[in-house]
Image: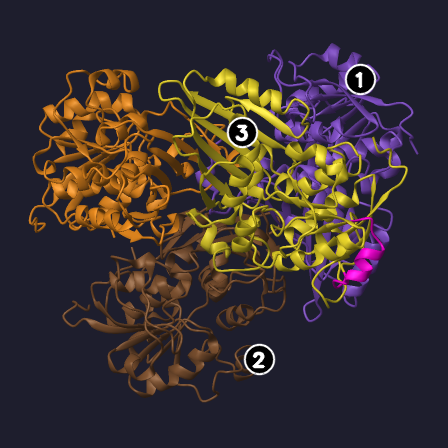
Chain colours: A yellow, B orange, C brown, D purple
């Protein structure tokens, strides 16, 4: 276990968005980290982050690849896909370990990647998919970690062990009805995220046309129906997942399988039939998973909750970093 | 068409809850109605409703069956199930036309009714299920109308025409992922509806154990999986409904079927692939329905939205009343 | 009283903003009005308003002065100040009666008007300040009505009668602590009105630098300290107003003065020591005013509430229109 | 400075309310603390706190004075006033250091204490008022700390240095317009804190009749006008404070005085004319203070923000504990 003998020098690119600020908040209090640089848009004048005053008082400078690379051992990219697609290979080439929070490098299938992330170069560096619980063993040797998306994190953690254990009847559709807080849409004002358009309302979007479906399907190895909704809250995702179980599979079998899968995962909390709620995971790095089975219809309902900026973005990136650098998995996350 | 020659005298029992106040708001400006009495709990002292000042300034008195019956031609019951179960037969016996907003008389199957509404007498009067669009022709001769529940209204209006037209593959489960504003839980303070427990959160409840599932199944004639969620808004329901279509059924067929079903329904708005949002139905009596189809998987996603206090409760009761008494269906509702 | 013998043909310019849509909602169900045209930005393609489907199904066309003027007797302008400043005089010159919801023509003092509304021409037509309760007698002969601003409406209605009756000690400051829902900031997305920036927060803005202070001071004839706050709700304004009373003035005197002032005002509701709340005025055209006095310190606290899109904008404009055209003051507003 | 050589054993009474859970969250990760016991209502069965799973997995037991006292060096009381009034003296008598979060022991004036906290014994132990920034020097020798109330914390921190420096014209009233999130009202469901009663609304309460006014006046030594409002958010307080300055006092003088007062206070952040917002202090232990001056009227507006459960309750208690036991003031609070 890393004993902080050597503090890791960390750079953050994209430090002014919601995810970037959350990264700075977590990294600035991490006992094994020194934040060596924080950068916003290229050419931007240095600024401070009011919300972080007294927590992290450094400046956020304009993006500069040389400065970013020279002063750091590891770099977190909280950038738009096209910027991450360009920067990550350069940083890896300079020997930096990169934790990319964008989707640019998540998809392994070249055709899918071209469809959803056309800016990503075909000849990308070797990538580890950054869902800690699933790829924990690959992280120590990683150079580029493509941190898992917010919706996929909640879905894959709930479903993957059950599919791997062959408990699910694949003849029926796997349905993921997902609800996310508005911070998941980022910091750029749009009509859809204007306060008066969201408050007191709920809407579905991206039906049959959201790139996170491809990411979920890649990790599950089976098609899913994925419908996200915009929830009038700031932070948090709740996914209600519907699958039909194979004959003879009951709630106890679900519980045993999930408990076995996450016995050594400190940041997954299984709640059984006490279904999880967003309020218990907001401002944490936990994924809470609960479930109920209707024996008559073999219908399983899973509820999976995360904070989209925590376990769904910044927290998960730090968790991946912790494992990659030999720290305790939850260090700096509680 | 009723020309208001004779104004209908109307009594409202249960006038202090959210549904009751909404009823008074609607009925007090209805050109064919005179609100003859409004009543709260038995023995309650007369009070006024601050929200209705200058809109309806009458007193809400303690519940008194004789006064309620003597002064009215029609009575709206916005009461708990056990109270409605007791009062409705007496009022019908006195020749009053009753619009019951509780669930007491909605289920026709005696066994199901005993399970979910044990207070309802087996020997109930003849009942019309009060979903106007579906039972429009039966309303003029009704004596007791069991107004449809909020969740069932949104679900049945979206699904019933498609099932009747045999467009749905019943081998796959019909899944109704429902999200409701908190006013649907009524006015009595509880831990679950305490502001700080709901705000910024989302939770599922009543999974595989909600009596509205029975009501939906009665009207659809087929089993459903129904999972309601408590949404951090005041008013509105959005249901995301998942069914698998029979081979060869496409989005156009869905549209044709729904347009045919609601050609003469002024309060159902079909939005096609522009999916509905709660904000467009809040404070209205509309049900908005949209849909998308994934041809590759034959998956149909329907979105159905209502205001749970409008089309889901008070507005629907007035709509039923309008048809029952020969008024224009939407009179006083816009 | 106008008996609807002649329906007034009405045009609405700026019909796609929050105020414009609210105007269409109100005018389309007004029994004395025919909406002859609705217009958005110049050159905009015709579109429909989803929220108004089945309520008002006309198109919103691109702005065209000739079309706007030719088909209408009265025109409502829900436009930015510079557009209203340009259009209003032309419409008046063509003999149209204009109800302007912008601030362009509200200030009578030329120097103040140049400071806050520099686009407004000095040689403006004769203007009636459109706060119905205060200028009811001038409206029938008006050609251009500058409808009162949202914050000023709540402040002036609460304070003006008390100042006119000389009940207030002007040696102490008059303080108006105002809180408004986000729809008051309009429909254009900005960082300040981005959902995640408002939700769960509260902030003051425009301290000592808000043009509504000048408008309030014009109507009260005395300086005020005015601090607005952005409230995480959609619709509604609550103002908490602090003044010191002259010796001997008590709560009863306040009540008598306000009751006398509003005896013939159907849309002002006085609540006495039961202080008003936003929820009772949201989606109405009422202004609710309550008060408490601390005899020991002669401190009076007034609470004044309106819906910023109702009595604070669209509703007030219709109320002014009603009086101007001889309709009942509250027609179409409840 | 305490080097954690000896971990302090801490008991928490009232561990199931919002403040109690927040205390457990903070104390369980405090490096100098061992939570030796957590207790709820007397006689309550042991339970766990779902929100704290994996953070603090101990049981919350029924209240037992002997167990509470025997195992702890320090005790935090997050109880109703009457329970704190009874327990605190017994615990002090047993040599425990007590941090009381209720109001029972805050008022020093016997008459005021009898009026607002009639259950508090007249012969109370020696008390330190627990506003760290103001009584830092008295905390190391304290036995009973009466932690400051939420509203008073924000008001006193903003006003006290200015009054002490004689910058304020006391001829004009000092007005504190306070807005608080609903968690400040506690966890017990009431009509006032029912979701549908708060959401989308705002209301004033306790005008001229709130016991926090007495607490503020005690610490400021001068009367204030205090009007609290219930804000539709979960956590956070913003106070808008209006005072008139003496002639010649300008914004710079305000800044110098506040900066001097808080030069050694790590948890007060001065924001100058960039006025603070609740979102920057929510989930922190900071008090953010900003100000603007209108030279023409000598009006000063101060904005002071805290998290009512953080600096306004649990965080402040831990801050007091830190100083009392020789830890760094902000230990465990960021």
Quadrant location of residue B296? top left
What secondary structure is marked by label 2?
A: helix
Q: Are marks 1 and 2 on the same chain?
A: no
The answer to which of C240 and B8 lies nearer the viewer is B8
User: Label 3 to label 2, Cα distance in Å?
Assistant: 56 Å
Residue C115 is marked as: 2
Q: What's the magenta region? A: A61-74
Q: Which residue is mark 3?
A: A276
Give x and y (percent) for residue C164: 47, 66
Q: Are marks 3 and 2 on the same chain?
A: no
Nearest the viewer among D147 and B220 is B220
Mark 1 falls within which chain?
D
Q: What residue does disc 1 label?
A: D72
Badge 1 element:
loop
In the image, residue C332 sits, relative to residue A239, either above or below, namely: below
Q: Quadrant of the C terminus of chain A?
A: top right
- Give the vertical position of D236 relative to C286 (above or below): above
**For this rendering, which residue is in front, B55 or C78?**
C78
- Mark 1 crowdedness (10 Å alpha carbons): few <14, some 14-19, many ≥20: some
**Spatial distance from mark 1 to mark 2, Cα to Cα?**
66 Å
C292 shown above or below C316: above
Residue B23 visible from this viewpoint: no
Q: Disc 3 is attached to a residue of which chain? A: A
């Amino acid at each position: 276990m890393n004993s902080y003998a050597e503090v890791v020098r960390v750079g953050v690119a994209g430090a002014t968005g919601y995810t970037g600020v959350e990264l700075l908040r977590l990294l600035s209090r991490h006992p094994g980290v020194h934040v060596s640089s924080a950068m916003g848009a290229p050419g931007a004048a240095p600024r401070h982050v009011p919300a972080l005053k007294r927590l992290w008082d450094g400046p956020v400078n304009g993006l500069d690849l040389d400065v970013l690379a020279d002063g750091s051992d590891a770099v977190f990219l909280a950038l738009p896909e096209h910027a991450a697609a360009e920067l990550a290979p350069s940083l890896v080439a300079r020997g930096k370990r990169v934790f990319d929070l964008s989707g640019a490098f998540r998809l392994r299938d070249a055709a899918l990647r071209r469809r959803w992330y056309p800016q990503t170069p075909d000849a990308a560096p070797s990538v580890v998919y950054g869902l800690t619980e699933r790829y924990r063993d690959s992280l120590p040797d990683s150079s580029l970690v493509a941190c898992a998306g917010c919706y996929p994190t909640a879905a894959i953690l709930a479903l993957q062990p059950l599919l791997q254990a062959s408990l699910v009847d694949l003849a029926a559709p796997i349905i993921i009805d997902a609800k996310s807080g508005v911070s998941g849409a980022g910091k750029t004002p749009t009509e859809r995220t204007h306060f008066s358009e969201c408050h007191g309302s709920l809407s579905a979007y991206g039906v049959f046309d959201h790139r996170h479906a491809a990411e979920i399907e890649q990790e599950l190895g089976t098609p899913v129906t994925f419908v996200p909704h915009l929830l009038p809250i700031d932070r948090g995702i709740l996914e209600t997942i519907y699958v039909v179980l194979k004959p003879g599979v009951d709630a106890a079998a679900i519980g045993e399988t999930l408990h076995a899968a996450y016995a050594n995962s400190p940041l997954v909390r299984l709640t059984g039939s006490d279904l999880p709620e967003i309020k218990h995971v907001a401002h944490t790095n936990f994924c809470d998973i609960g479930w109920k089975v209707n024996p008559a219809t073999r219908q399983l309902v899973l509820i999976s909750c995360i904070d989209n900026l925590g376990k769904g973005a910044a927290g998960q990136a730090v968790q991946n970093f912790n494992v990659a650098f030999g720290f305790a998995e939850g260090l700096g996350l509680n």
